[in-house]
Image (cartoon, rainbow, N blue to C red):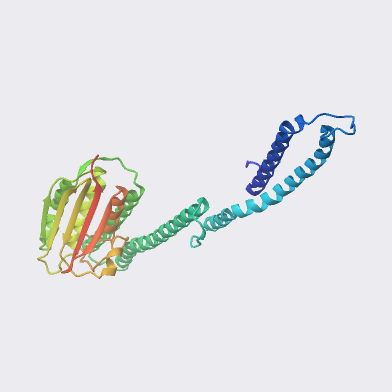
Amino acid sequence: MGSRRGLRARLKLTLSYAGFLLVAGALLLAVVWLYLLRYVPDNSRGLLGVSPNRYLLVHTFAPAAAVAMAGLLVFGLVGGWLLAGRMLSPLTRITAAARLAGNGTLSHRIRMTGRRDEFRELSDAFDSMLEQLESHVAEQRRFAANASHELRTPLAISRTLLDVARKDPTRDRHDLIERLHAVNTRAIGLTEALLLLSRGDGGAFPRERVDLSLLAEEAAETLLPLAEQRRITLDVTGTAARTDGSAELLLRMVTNLVQNAVVHNLPEGGGTVAVRTGADGGTSVLRVENTGPRLAPELIPTLTEPFRRGTDRVRTDEHAGVGLGLAIAHSVVRAHTGTVDLTARPSGGLVVTVRLPGAA
């Protein structure tokens, strides 16, 4: 059961302003009485020739004081109402914007002008919040649309294979099973990547002391067969780079960066992937640099978005890409309050630099 609606803020301010004026007027009259009228001789009989006369002054002063108090009350109510309306007008605009946002309209902005006061700061903070919400909602919608599209593809392929097998009983079952296995593996990998991306965005995970140099060596050891298969030289060097976070998520981040560097390398082979770790002041740094095709400058900022691919990758059953490698890495780094910088190499390829807070 909701609480009863109280007085509006404008009415409260008006009554407060009028009450303040009445109290100030009463105090002024009290001061006049205490410090002026009590020193005037009292002549309640109204005898002639006695001046000044407190009796006459009181009976003359009292009606005038009553009129003055009534005037102060009217002035306080009217002036307080106008002044409160002027002061609260920014809140009216902010309230209207909040109602629009509550109805799903996030593109509206207050854009309050004038001197920078508390209301202006509140308006700017509200506009900034709306901008972030609009960007987040747009990103989530785009992500949901892309995820639906990516998940629909393996499901559609599986249904097609099963329809063909049902219509053609003589079809080789071994080939059908292998193809279904590959499609199912890709769907599972995509689902796990989506769950990992959601987990990284949430930031809810236990933290422990982690050394990025050890994670880089582990990721390189895991991906060495893939690098050898593509004739890519994988080099890992550097010093200890300790941070506090989830070892599982950080290992996935490093593995994704190294795998992305191997897969998006020179298609004819002979390329390199260099992984460097180290500490820079109070920051732990991981740098992954790879050769490869040249990337357009306008493409670089979009590579960390989900389902973005810088180049056409050659898919294998073991390392089928889903366009979430850099997005997951960026999400994990962001959850660990770090930063990711992407730079295109002039001769082709990409340099990814991850900076994480050093271990406490």
Q: Nearer the viewer, residue 212 or 130?
A: 130
**Does residue 308 appear anywhere in the picture?**
no
Q: Position of residue 87 (x, y in %)?
A: 59, 52
Q: Nearer the viewer, residue 355 or 17?
A: 17
**Residue at position x 25%, y 48% from top?**
356
- The image quarter containing residue 187 is bottom left
**In the picture shown, does residue 72 fall above or below 299?**
above
Q: Nearer the viewer, residue 18 or 292?
A: 18
- The image quarter containing residue 344 is bottom left
Q: Position of residue 347 (x, y in %)?
A: 15, 69
**Residue at position x 20%, y 66% from top?**
314
**Residue at position x 20%, y 46% from top?**
281
Q: Position of residue 219 (x, y in %)?
A: 17, 51
In this rendering, would 191 be left or right of 40? Answer: left
Image quadrant holding the N terminus, namely top right
**In the picture shown, does residue 112 fall above or below 294?**
above
Q: Nearer the viewer, residue 159 or 19?
A: 19
